[in-house]
Image (cartoon, coloured by chain):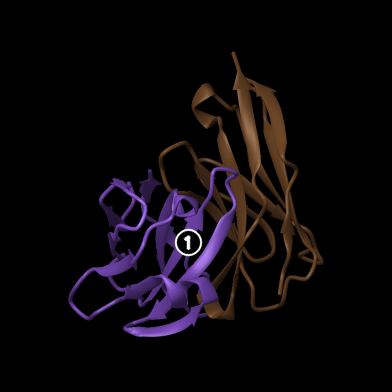
Chain colours: A purple, B brown
Amino acid sequence: NSKVIQTPRYLVKGQGQKAKMRCIPEKGHPVVFWYQQNKNNEFKFLINFQNQEVLQQIDMTEKRFSAECPSNSPCSLEIQSSEAGDSALYLCASSLPGTGGWAPLFGEGTRLSVL
Amino acid sequence: LAKTTQPPSMEAYEGQEVNVSCSHTNIATSEYIYWYRQVPHQGPQFIIQGYKDYVVNEVASLFISADRKLSTLSLPWVSLRDAAVYYCIVTHQGGRALIFGTGTTVSVSP
């Protein structure tokens, strides 16, 4: 019973189309992560936020990927021009940073298929 | 930064105990260890966490070596529903970064 809500569960796009997915983090978790999981079950970090501010992001994210976590709205990850290699499971996770050892929570993911 | 490695796969029969190991040789004093399971078409689900020694909850137990470089997830009495990919994750930067293990696919036969 995940408390991180991701929508949509499945997304099908043609090459060159925009793809947008959303994430509502666990209440009270200020840190949000986006990961891309490929068919080999490898996790690739994309970007993370603390509140509305970007903490870290990879170069790929800066080019075709954009993400935001506005206050009082879902976080979102958008791919401006989808490519076949973007087909993957996109996972959102949230956490409460600090020394208390709070477990990050993951959403169910958005499965993107680029045809 | 901790690097985490796991055996790629394990097999078990229903009713057996399964022990999945994770090596995190560069783990720092500030980093915690978490274990998750993932089944197809779902996100990773939290199982158990620890910092040192031995932790147990209603579904699993976790042993962490004294030097914290190795952790072992123990699943007692596995059933077919426990077939999944199990990941250890080490948090870094006070929980602002996640270091994923390579994942262990656990297969369960009747």
Image quarter hosting the C terminus of chain A: top left
Look at the picture and state if B73 lies above or below B80: below
Q: Residue furthest bottom?
A: A53
Look at the picture and state if B109 lies above or below B38: above
| Residue B3 drawn at (x, y percent) | 73, 65
Locate residue B76 relative to residue B59 in the image: left or right: right
| Residue B36 drawn at (x, y percent) | 54, 49
The residue positioned 60% from the left and 49% from the top of the image is B87
* Disc 1 element: strand
Residue A33: name its quadrant: bottom left
Question: Between A106 and A112, which is closer to the camera in this rendering?
Answer: A112
Look at the picture and state if A71 lies above or below A29: below
Q: Amino acid at mark 1?
A: Tyr
| Mark 1 neighbour class, 10 Å CA radius: few under 14, some 14 to 19, many 20 or more | some
Residue A80: name its quadrant: bottom left
| Residue B17 drawn at (x, y percent) | 67, 30
Q: Which residue is disc 1 drawn over? A: A35
Question: Between A85 and B51, which is closer to the camera in this rendering?
Answer: A85
Question: Could you tell me if residue A58 is visible in this image?
Answer: no
The residue positioned 50% from the left and 52% from the top of the image is A85
Task: Tell me which chain the residue with mark 1 is part of.
Answer: A
Question: Could you tell me if residue A14 is visible in this image?
Answer: yes
Locate residue B68 relative to residue B14 in the image: left or right: right
The residue positioned 41% from the left and 39% from the top of the image is B41
The residue positioned 38% from the left and 45% from the top of the image is A113
| Residue B15 drawn at (x, y percent) | 61, 21
Mark count: 1
